Amino acid sequence: MEQKHLNNVPSSVRSNYMAGMAALEKNNLDYAILLFKGCVQKEPGFMEARAQLRKMEKQVTDSASFFKKMMNKLKSSPPVAAATALMAAGKHIEAMRKAEDALAIDLSSLQALQLLAQAAEQLGANFISVEALEIARNYNPKNISVLDKLACAYISGKNGSQALRIRQEIAALLPGKLEAQQKVREAAALASIEGGGWEGTDDYRDILKNQGEAEHIEQVDRITRSVDDVAERIAYIEKEIKGGKVTLDNNRKLADLYQKAEEYDKSIELYNKVIKEMGALDPLIDKAIEKSNIGKFDITIKQWQEYLEANPDQKEESERNIAELEKQKYEHRLSRALERVNTYSNDLQLRYNLACAYWDGGDVDNALQQFQLSQKNPQRRISSFVYLGQCFSAKGQYDMAIEQFTKAIGEMVMMDNQKMEALYHLGSTYDLLGKKAEALECFKSIYQANVKYRDVAERINKSYTK
């Protein structure tokens, strides 16, 4: 994909560009953005249109109120999701167009910018990758992943001096990290030979093969325990993949790490890639995708909660949006659980997961049905008994609830949290039936093991003060 200018784009695109400039003169920013975006979507390499579009998008994004920014983030989610799906399907041009739709709403959308950069990279449009990642860097100046990708994009474009600038920024953010320092040296070497010797190869590693690299092989199987560990492992596996080690295992490991780093869109993209390469739905990977999607919901919900704390006068609007997001989050969780059960109907663990989703959503009858099936799973047998007891209790069928709780407790040896939970539910059910003595015996058993468990201490103390 090549850069194009006003004099060598189709006349229809040129006309739209001129109309956009006219709209700009009248300060009709929304219409100007619409026209410039159309130009870029038809001719991604049209540089004048790209420059005007980004200028207008930045003006609109940066001047928006906090509330407007929050709403724009929500509005940009559908085109981002569409772009992600198109990328997974290998439809890079279409993915770029959807990413542009998202950026026209919210230029600061990190997911949209990364998708645009990835699609452009696949299409050989390095100048678009660099543009997108520079914008991402401006909005996320301390995001190591963004900076690393930007440095790599500059290297791909054989721009050593800019790569060195970014590598130095990364090293400043990661003091003491040997790999970051090593990459600064590599970038300095590239910058020093810029203009000669580099053009003969497509792989900068050929030039630097005698420069040496920081070795991390001993860290491959290390247990990831901290944020720094996660970031370092991400950088290492990304480097392996870029070096040609594109394997299912590496993609799966990297997706897991992205999830730990709360880079949920990137994790979802890689998980989908793994599923596509496997040619079948893996319930564990599908569950991981669900977890990343839930994480995205949780981040947005947290942002609204923080907004509510800072703007109590917007309580009604904030609470409405939070409730809607919670609803969407639950519906997503339930739909994925149902899909997995429909695909693997004999998997009792999946039945258990579906039952828990129903229970959490207050659908007692469907939860009851699924827990009756999941109790046949040896690993979920006792837990299913406890849930069945809760289901019967919720329906007012206390005698059957007691039977399930008693059955579960009878199979528990240690007084752990699971047993205390079952005893608590059994005691509460006896209490509802007016069987105070039986209830007290349950609460005493818990009290002797953990005086701080729920309200057991209060219940015990009340029984002794009567």
Image: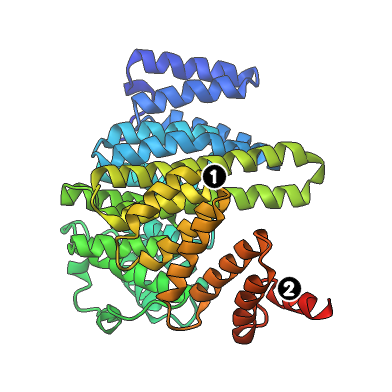
Residue 245, horizontal then vertical, whole percent = 18, 64
The answer, for residue 401, to whether it is visible in the render is yes
Give left or right: position of 335 versus 219: right
Q: Secondary structure at mark 2?
A: helix
Residue type at mark 2 is Arg
Location of the C terminus by quadrant is bottom right
Residue underneath mark 1: 108
Residue 35, horizontal then vertical, whole percent = 48, 20
- The structure residue drawn at horizontal position 64% and vertical position 17%, both measured from the top left corner, is 26
Circle on res. 459: 2
Depth check, front residue: 452 or 269: 452
Residue 188, horizontal then vertical, whole percent = 36, 71
Residue 348, horizontal then vertical, whole percent = 29, 56
- The structure residue drawn at horizontal position 19% and vertical position 74%, both measured from the top left corner, is 209
- The structure residue drawn at horizontal position 58% and vertical position 49%, both measured from the top left corner, is 396
Give left or right: position of 70 versus 38: right
Depth check, front residue: 44 or 122: 122
Location of the N terminus by quadrant is top left
* Corner quadrant of residue 197: bottom left
